[in-house]
Each structure stands twice: as C-alpha cells, then as structure tokens.
Amino acid sequence: MGAPPAVPDDPAVVAARARARARRRRQLRRAAPPPHASGTPPHASGTPPQSGQRFEWANTVLGAGSLVGGLMFYAGIMHSSAYFAYFHVRASILGFGFPQMIIWSLRLVTLPVLVGLALLAVTPRLPELLVSLRVPHRVTLGVRRAVRAVARQYVLFVAAGVVLMLLWQHIQPYGWAAPLLVAAGLVLGQSDAANPVRPPRGLWRRGFPIAAAGLFLVWMIALVAGHLGTQDARSAAAHLVRRPAVVVLSVERLSLTGPGLVTETLPGMHYRYRYTGLRLILERDRRYYVLPVGWRARTDPAFVIEDDDTILVQLMPGTRPQDGTDPR
C-alpha cells in the first residue's frame, strides 16, 4: 500500500512548503541586479545616465522637428502651387525658398487642425488623464473599453476610406477624408488595443502598414493644402480691388488689354503711356504679377511687368470698403 495522503495541517507538509518558498525567494534575489551602495555611482563606465537620456531626448526632438519641417515645406509647395495656378502662374518659376514655403504652410494651421492635433495627442493617454483628474473608476474603465473597441474595428476605417475613394467625384471638396480614414485605420491596427495577444512585428505586419499610413497622410496634406490654396486665390480674385493698385508708365506702347484696364497717352512726357486699373498679385525680383480689376479666371490672362529703364511701376493703395460694404 502507498503512503497515506498528506493533510493540510501536517507539520511535514507545512515545513516543505516553507522551504520551497524560501528557495524561490533566494532564486529571485540572485536573478535581480544588486542595488548600488549609498554614495556609489550607478554606472561603471563613468558616463552618467543623464547624458544618455539627454541624447535620446535631443534625438527625438530633432527627428520630430525634421519630420514636421518636411511636412510643412511640402504643404507650402502644394498651397502656393494651387494659389498661383488659379492666376495662370506656375509657382516653380517664382523661386520661393524654404522660409517662404514654411510661411505659406501656416495657412493650414487653423482652429480645426489644432483641435484635431490636440485630440490626437491626448487620446493615447486618455485613461491616465482621467485617473489624474480623479474621474470615477467605472468611467475610466468604460473609456478603456471604448478605446479598445474602436481600435479593434480598424478594418472598418480602412474599408470606409476605400469606399470614399470609389466615390471620389461625389465627396469633393472633402476628398481628404478618404486618405485620412485609411491612415487612421492602419495606425489603429498597429496599436496594442487592437493586438492584445500578438503585437505586430516584422516588415509586413508593422513596417509596411506604417509606411502606407505615412503616404496616405502626405496625400491628405496635399489635398487640404491644394484646396485651401485654390480657396484663397478665389477670395483674392473676388476682392481684387482691395489689393495694391499698380500704375504702369512706359516709354513704348504695351500690349495690355483687359476688363477695367485704362490706357492713357501723355504727350511730351518721357513715359508717354500710362496704364491704370491693375492690381498687384505678387512682386518678386523686380517683376510685378498684375491683373486688371475686372479679371476673369477662365478667360483673362495675368500680366508680368518687368521693371527696367523703359518702364516705371508705381504702387498705390487699393480701394477700401466703407462701412463694411464692398465697393464692387
């Protein structure tokens, strides 16, 4: 016959369990790194950990700044190209540099964009933020569950974006929503909430979706910047009389014609011909890009006046509305 089963109150069983617990504690102490003695530096190479943290912080800031600067430069190119294309001028011939493109890109910094970026930055830390605000635990738990539920539906975001692309002609001027949804779905698919058991790793499961999301975001920026550029150009053309007035004095007759343009002859003057009724769009490198006050986008050309010895260009204030009314 075998030995009788041990009962919980058997002293031998209690002693064996105590020895097993003591043995596990010793094993854990051997595996853990020994604490540093008081007054002893926690490093052996002589480099304090603060320097490594500072280098990592500086590297992160530099990388983020380069990314933001590149995106702003790209947005400035798209905005300026769409703006001047409305006036039949190619932005590439204007010779804008990096600072000018950054300034053009600031047109995209609107209140909805700032609100969206703030929400994007806060959303991953929303549960911690609720805890710091002493929100009841049941509310925090509900928010966590809602975030996980939304993240696990990332395929629906991608599918909705693809459907909007198929309906491209019918969703304008909100076509930027299609690449935004696809990018959001791809990013959510890489989150821990969407992959609680097996986090995505490797080139195809992590690298390719992140790269694709970046391309869709760049496409979205191009769409938004181009739409705003065209919108700004239309606004400028609608209030053309408010822009600086241009008076062109020339020794010889110029081939300037257009609605609202007035040509005068000044006998006995060095500059014999005077042209009024023009408005300035851009001045760059002694070249003046002007439009007649009655300019129409579909039929009328833009004029480029180059300042030289035979031409004198005078700039004057444009017409200003009185009492909130448009003089046109």
Image (cartoon, rainbow, N blue to C red):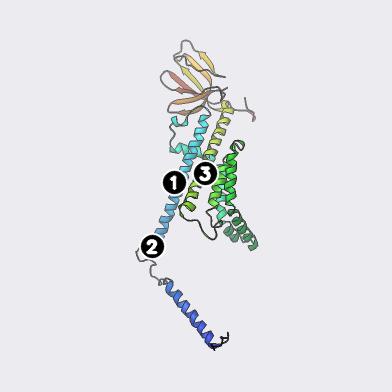
Tell which tag, 2 or 3, sits nearer the viewer. 3
Mark 2: secondary structure = loop
- Distance from Cα at disc 1 to Cα at disc 3: 19 Å
Q: Nearer the viewer, residue 85 or 27?
A: 27
Judge whether residue 93 can be spotted in this image: yes
**Are there few (<14), some (14-19), or many (20+) residues within 10 Å of tag 3?**
many
Horizontally, residue 134 falls left or right of residue 63, namely right
Q: Which residue is mark 3?
A: 216
262 to 73, vertically: above or below = above
Q: Which residue is mark 2?
A: 48
320 to 40, vertically: above or below = above
Q: Amino acid at mark 2?
A: Pro
Q: Amino acid at mark 3?
A: Phe
Q: Nearer the viewer, residue 89 or 211?
A: 211
Could you tell me which residue is drawn at 65 percent across and 62 percent down?
Answer: 138
Horizontally, residue 293 falls left or right of residue 53, namely right
